Image (cartoon, rainbow, N blue to C red):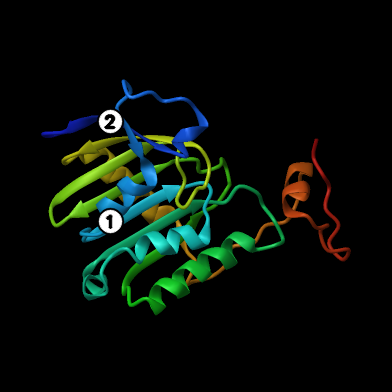
Amino acid sequence: MPRAMTVSPTIYVARPHRFALGDDIDHDQLEEALKREIVNATEVTMFGDFYSVDPLVKLCTGIPKRSRKNCRIRFVMGLDAKTSIPKPWDDMRRVRSRLLAEKFVDLVVAIVDSSPVHFHTKLFRFVHRTHPVWFVGSANPGSSRHELMVRLAGRHDAPSAYIQAVLAKAVDVGGVVVRHKIDTFRDFFCGGSLPPAAAPTTLHL
């Protein structure tokens, strides 16, 4: 059960000008809110099924250099398609390399496989020493789309346990790349290449 949780009356919106949100609607820009939360964070956890490399790295560099070695970073992304082009792995390795270059040392960047179902969670947690702040909604890490999140503050055992379960299942991009054969039309169109001629694959409709 949640303990001493508070729910912010504000909604946090990325690209809020997409719709006419009047002064009577309590809203704030999501990007600015994340910047405020991360600057003093001692732990950052972000789950998503989509990502954008440069904004994600830029967000993290909002943590002062003197604090980076003591800040724990955990990024987990979903793998949408079984593809022979390892772009998500390459991108997440770029994120990892760039953050290591920025002097972050306690770092996990990982991917959750698409089998048997696509990982679609959007969950951010910023811990300030012992005080966690949560954002839950539609936004992916580094997304440039119109998104909506709600903010909760305080300890919550269930999503904390969920985070640990996801981390236990996810594959760190610093380790072995997991590859799959393309065996559906969806995989082919998402992947953008044919299976190797030496190993023909039946496409299941």
Q: Residue at image x 25%, y 66%?
A: 71
Q: Residue 180: which quarter of the image?
A: bottom right
Can residue 183 be seen here? The reply is no
Q: Residue at image x 22%, y 30%?
A: 7
The residue indicated by pointer 1 is 38
Q: Which mark is residue 123?
A: none
Relative image position of residue 40 (x, y in whole percent) = 20, 59
SS class, disc 2: strand
Q: Residue 25: which quarter of the image?
A: top left
On screen, residue 86 versus residue 176, left or right, reads right
- In the rendered view, tell whether residue 196 sits above or below residue 168: below
Relative image position of residue 12 (x, y in whole percent) = 35, 36
- In the rendered view, tell whether residue 108 sits above or below residue 145: below
Q: Residue 2: which quarter of the image?
A: top left
Report the label total.
Answer: 2
Q: Residue at image x 83%, y 53%?
A: 201
Q: Which mark is residue 10?
A: 2
Q: Amino acid at mark 1?
A: Ile
Disc 2 or 1, which lies upstream in sequence? 2
Q: Furthest residue to the top?
A: 24
Q: Residue at image x 29%, y 48%?
A: 125
Q: Indicate the quadrant containing the N terminus: top left, top right, bottom left or bottom right.
A: top left
Can residue 195 be seen here? The reply is yes
Q: Nearer the viewer, residue 175 or 148?
A: 148
Measured in 3D between alpha carbons, the distance from the residue under mark 2 to the one under mark 1, in whole angstroms, is 18 Å
Q: Amino acid at mark 2?
A: Thr
How many other residues sit within 10 Å of disc 2, few (<14), some (14-19) or many (≥20)?
few
SS class, disc 1: helix
On screen, residue 8 versus residue 197, left or right, reads left
Relative image position of residue 30 (x, y in whole percent) = 37, 42
- In the rendered view, tell whether residue 66 sits above or below residue 51: below
How many other residues sit within 10 Å of disc 1, few (<14), some (14-19) or many (≥20)?
many
